[in-house]
Amino acid sequence: MTPLDPPRGLRAVVSPVVGLAVAERRVDDPVATLICVHGGLDRGGSFARLARRVERFDVIAYDRRGYQGSRGSGPATLERHIEDLLALASVEASQRPVIVFGHSFGGVVSFGAALRDPSLFAQVINFEAPLPWVLQRDHRRVARDAAPSEEAEQFFKRMVSVETWERLSEAERDSRRLDGAALVADLSVLNEPEPFQVADIAVPTIYAFGSWARAPYYRQLTALLHSRNPLIEGVELPDAGHGAHLSHPDQLARLIERAWNDLCASA
């Protein structure tokens, strides 16, 4: 499967994984492949701005199972999302090192995949992955009788803004609502028992976060992560909010470049 009209900077390709819509940006003489994993109620196309700013890495972005171009094969469990990422990484790792960038819930998937098979990943970079098992934060539980479409609308309004929702076309709103079942599956994971131990991660990892209203929480979280696993380093992006891949792609691109250079220098 392929994404529906990927934004400028990404090109739809035939997916090596059945059921996934995949897009890519290839560069001359890449030093590594960057695989981007999106969060709840998002899609692979949201990484186009980041992809256009990355000069040394091939970029792979995909719609997670249950979302937009991959909607027909979902929603999926965390386990299935991990398997999908491992399948994509195994294809790229046969050619060059793989960096995985996980945004929000995509970071949970990235951690799970790196734990499952660390040989496939040279580096993990996550941005504000929800880890309530490490440090609890108030988050809204999905009501048992809530319609997935309504949950999707309310989630978008909370995480982005009511004003942005109102600016969407009706077709765009309907598309987000159709992703509601996949969103509910993601959110349910956060209320389940801890799926993995961060102390067991054996891949150099950056946990990045923005200096917005929730920065104090993330500073505390990254300190806990580092205390449990010295391979996990916290990095704060000035002025960035949760949607940094959309609002601050230049900062993220520089972070990924620096992280790779530091990794190579220490090798």
Image (cartoon, rainbow, N blue to C red):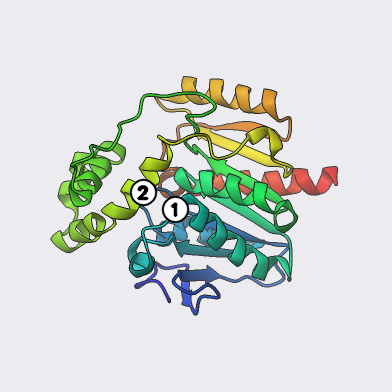
**Residue 64, x across and y down, in percent:** 44, 60
Q: Residue at x 67, y 41 (%)?
A: 205
Residue picked out by circle 1: 77
Q: CA distance from mark 2 to mark 1?
A: 7 Å
Horizontal arrangement in the rendering, residue 72 relative to residue 145 (left or right): right
Residue picked out by circle 2: 185
Dot 1 alpha-carbon crowd within 10 angstroms: few under 14, some 14 to 19, many 20 or more:
some
Horizontal arrangement in the rendering, residue 47 relative to residue 171 (left or right): right
Answer whether residue 153 is visible to the viewer in this image. Answer: yes
Residue 94: which disc? none
In this view, the residue farthest toward the bottom is 14
Q: Residue at x 77, y 45 (%)?
A: 263
Horizontal arrangement in the rendering, residue 228 relative to residue 249 (left or right): right
**Residue 81, x across and y down, in percent:** 50, 56
Of 111 and 29, nearer the camera is 111
Tell me where residue 157 sits by quadrant. Answer: top left
Q: Secondary structure at mark 1?
A: loop
